[in-house]
Amino acid sequence: MATALSEEELDNEDYYSLLNVRREASSEELKAAYRRLCMLYHPDKHRDPELKSQAERLFNLVHQAYEVLSDPQTRAIYDIYGKRGLEMEGWEVVERRRTPAEIREEFERLQREREERRLQQRTNPKGTISVGVDATDLFDRYDEEYEDVSGSGFPQIEINKMHISQSIEAPLTATDTAILSGSLSTQNGNGGGSVNFALRRVTSAKGWGELEFGAGDLQGPLFGLKLFRNLTPRCFVTTNCALQFSSRGIRPGLTTVLARNLDKNTVGYLQWRWGIQSAMNTSIVRDTKTSHFTVALQLGIPHSFALISYQHKFQDDDQTRVKGSLKAGFFGTVLEYGAERKISRHSVLGAAVSIGVPQGVSLKVKLNRASQTYFFPIHLTDQLLPSAVFYATVGPLVVYFAMHRLIIKPYLRAQREKELEKQRESAATDVLQKKQEAESAVRLMQESVRRIIEAEESRMGLIIVNAWYGKFVNDKSRKSEKVKVIDVTVPLQCLVKDSKLILTEASKAGLPGFYDPCVGEEKNLKVLYQFRGVLHQVMVLDSEALRIPKQSHRIDTDG
């Protein structure tokens, strides 16, 4: 009698929403919801061949949902990983008396095995492009008597340095990774490059080691060894040994870092560096959801300094951050402040102003695009000029807001529309099928709804006058947008029991008789109902729970 459902059909259903039960529903609640829907959709109750066929499909769907949720093991898998988790190979050998925690552990083991099979296909490319700009001629101009020199009428802006680096990782086994990196640099007409190869092995859950080999035209061969080890659950150490070969001989180097978690959000570091630019450094870093704070002190040759920096993280969609730092040492004093903001799904744009003695004033612009970084340090002046500070601060803000309004915002809107259109196109077939299933469900509900309405009218109970589900446009500024709603009066009346309607906290699109009329867009449910002869009205978000009747929904007829 029953026809099998395709995997695509099952994958597009929310079982809890289909049965209209809470995720914490007991076995008794599941059984009651299942029995009620079985009575509604049982094929033997319908003699018409077309209705009987439609009832079979819906009955099988409800039966599949109940089978998954009534079994503790499959329900635990579904709750943690969804329907995709049920499709993973290997569950048939799992002992059925396992707890949800043990099932999670088993799933992660199966997932690790699958990841290892795909290991050879993965790399982790990273790159940096840095372009240094000398714009000091904008502010540090010669006196007037030199202005008659040919070509001196316009400021000279030059690119004085450039650096490009790239690296890729190639997993060899579950514990071994090969890393290949290279870099090219040029400054004031002189340049060079280098290439490095490293082999990293994870020796245990507590540590790893890495061998590095490098060569370049500015420096000779390099041999290095890096070791990482967790000493305790709250403490770890990193050691880096290197031998640099050059025309002056062998130059050894050693760097050791000892770190300890002082609390959940704070880490303390002790660093000792011997060899080239020997130094001792200590720092404390505190990172929370809303801020990042660093204080550091270094004693060394040739640089000794003290540093304090703070970054505030705004809890907005654009992940806006503002930061400031003060660094003072033998080289002078530098004050730096700036901000960064997410401008698209994979891009973060930031700018910072650096004011120092004797460094002068610089503007640093940085764009992070996925794993690539583009950095543009612009040196404005060697002096502390208020005009340079003003333009370095205000200029990027004006440019950003102009670009955001004229370029970024329209581009993101167009991208969202394109993705939404693509989503609609890919879901068009499924939406049509869901619409047909919903219409079939509504036809199957007619007789039950007629009996429910008669029972509710006899006791002045809950009558659903009208109900709509989909996209509503109430804002005058969005008048051009099209309203996309469907009538769900019958499906909601069918869910009324003992003059009450309870909808759980889940998308309404999975309820019997519902479907999604506007894929990817914000949806609401609007209900006009009558209780004890009085009209009530309520509108809720798609995933918001609903319980009616309520006194607060009553329409004030006095106005």
Image (cartoon, helix red, strand yellow):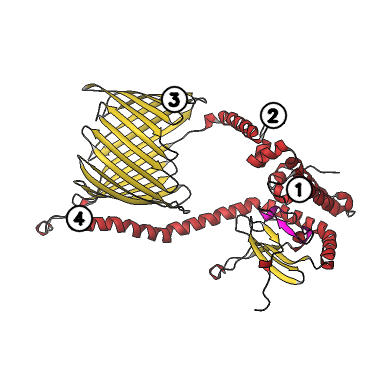
- Label 3 crowd bin: few (<14), some (14–19), many (20+), radius 10 Å: some
- What residue do we see at 47% from left, 56% from top? 411
Helix, strand or loop under label 3: strand
Q: What residue type is labelled 1?
A: Glu
Helix, strand or loop under label 2: loop
Give the answer, above or below, for where 175 lies relative to 24. above
- What residue do we see at 68% from left, 53% from top? 504
Mark linked to residue 94: 2
Left or right: 111 in relation to 164: right
Which of disc 3 and disc 4 is earlier in sequence? 3
Spatial CA span between label 4 and label 2: 72 Å
Give the answer, above or below, for where 300 lies relative to 410. above
Helix, strand or loop under label 1: helix
Magenta highlight range: 493-511
Which of disc 2 and disc 1 is earlier in sequence? 1
Q: Which amino acid does label 4 sit on?
A: Leu
Which of disc 2 and disc 4 is earlier in sequence? 2
Q: Which amino acid does label 2 sit on?
A: Val
Label pair 2/3, CB-CB below 8 angstroms: no
As for residue 494 lying within the magenta part, the answer is yes
Residue 257 appears at what percent x and percent y?
Answer: 35, 29
Mark linked to residue 385: 4
Q: In front of the other: label 4 or label 3?
A: 3
Which of disc 1 and disc 3 is earlier in sequence? 1
Spatial CA span between label 1 and label 2: 27 Å
Residue 230 appears at what percent x and percent y?
Answer: 44, 27
Residue 111 appears at what percent x and percent y?
Answer: 60, 32
Q: Considering the image in quadrants, where does the N terminus appear?
A: top right
